[in-house]
Each structure stands twice: as C-alpha cells, then as structure tokens.
Amino acid sequence: MHGTTLWTTSGFGLWDFVLLLVIAGVCGAIGQAISGVSRGGCLVSIALGFIGALVGMWLARLLGLPELFTISINGAKFPIIWSIIGSAVFVAIISVITRARG
C-alpha cells in the first residue's frame, strides 16, 4: 500500500465522502424545515438530502429547468437547491401519506 489511503477509489477519498454526507445532511435538514415536518435525526437528514437530490433533479429535468447551484466535490456534482426542494417535496408527500393512514 504505497501512498494509498483508505477509501481512495478514482480520486474520491474519505474526506470527500464525509463532506458529501455533511452537505446532504444540511440540505435534508433545510428541506425538513421548509416542509414543517421534522422526524428523525442526523441520519434521516442525510438520507433526505440524497433522496431530495434525486427527486429534485428528476423534477428539474421533467420541467426542463437547469441545475441552479451545484457543489463539485472531487468531480462529483451535488445539486444544492434541487436537493433542498426535492427533500421538502418528499417529506411533505410522506407526511400526507402517514397522516392519511393514521
């Protein structure tokens, strides 16, 4: 293991991954705050950030809208605005579904 570090695959290192998790967590937390529903802790916010990025980018492509603000972490792009919007939409939909069942 000459000069290699843990989690280094094609230039994406451990600290890049940690930074990506932190950014996703912040986006998920903001999305929860916008929707007015806050369930779970840090791990839920991280998951919502990633799910929000998928939902938000899907909505943006569906409507033909551009990526507004992305952060590039060692070549990996993360859409900040669409992640926040997507996580807010996802949390609102989940909240409506769980209220309807309960």
Image (tube, grey):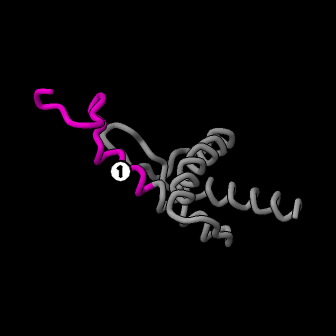
- Position of residue 2 relative to residue 75, above or below, is above
What residue do we see at 45% from left, 52% from top? 69
Question: Is residue 7 highlighted in magenta?
Answer: yes
Q: Nearer the viewer, residue 65 or 26?
A: 26
Percent position of residue 71, x then y: 39, 49
Q: How many marks?
A: 1
Residue 11's spot in the image, x, y percent?
A: 26, 33
User: Which residue: 88% across, 59% down?
Assistant: 101
**Is 84 situated left or right of 19 in this image?**
right
Q: Which residue is mark 1?
A: 18
Q: Amino acid at mark 1?
A: Val
Q: Which residues are magenta?
A: 1-23
Other residues around mark 1 within 10 Å, as few (<14) / some (14–19) / many (≥20): few
Task: Spot the residue most to the front.
Answer: 1
Q: Going by the image, does 100 lie left or right of 92?
A: right
Please tell me which residue is depicted at 59% across the width and 48% down the height of the picture: 51
**Image coordinates for residue 66, horizontal then vertical, percent:** 54, 44
